[in-house]
Amino acid sequence: FAVKTVTADYLGSAKLNDTLRIETQIHRLTGAQIVFLQDVCRAAQKLFSAKITVFCITEAGKPARFPANIRTKLEKIAN
């Protein structure tokens, strides 16, 4: 995988020893690309929010479609 884009909003700060919760979900899945939404929270307060787009590449670094077995697993997670 390679990262295509990251859009991040820093909404608050955390301190050492804070307990943080990281929530990640698949927002969109295509043949070769995944868009993740990610939030970092302390209790009910959202500290960070991001939208991350990654895409599948071959060992040579060329764009590629997801192998069928990986796409099936990703689809199960996304739904």
Image: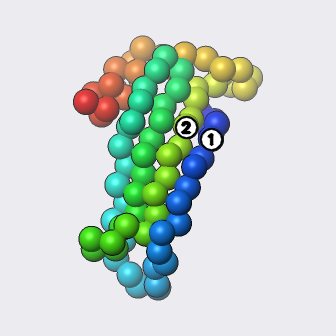
**Which residue lies most toward the bottom here?**
16
Q: Amino acid at mark 1?
A: Thr
Hey, which quadrant is residue 72 in on the image? top left
In the foreground, 66 or 4: 4
In the foreground, 8 or 74: 8
Mark seen at residue 5 = 1
Q: Residue at x 56, y 35 (%)?
A: 54
Q: Residue at x 46, y 57 (%)?
A: 49
Q: Amino acid at mark 2?
A: Thr
In the foreground, 50 or 22: 50
Instruction: Identify the secondary structure beneath mark 1.
Output: strand
Left or right of residue 54, residue 41 in this image: left
Mark seen at residue 54 = none
Instruction: Identify the secondary structure beneath mark 2.
Output: strand
Q: CA distance from mark 1 to mark 2?
A: 5 Å
Left or right of residue 21, residue 31 in this image: right
Q: Do the residues under discs 1 and 2 have CB atoms within 8 angstroms?
A: yes
Total of numbered circles in the picture?
Answer: 2
User: Where's the N terminus, which quadrant?
Assistant: top right
Residue 61, given in percent of the width and then of the height, sits at 72, 26
Left or right of residue 72, residue 64 in this image: right
Q: Residue at x 38, y 37 (%)?
A: 26
Point out the tag, 1 or 2, that comes first from the N-terminus.
Answer: 1
Look at mark 2 in the image and give the residue it sits on.
Answer: 53
Residue 65, given in percent of the width and then of the height, sits at 54, 16
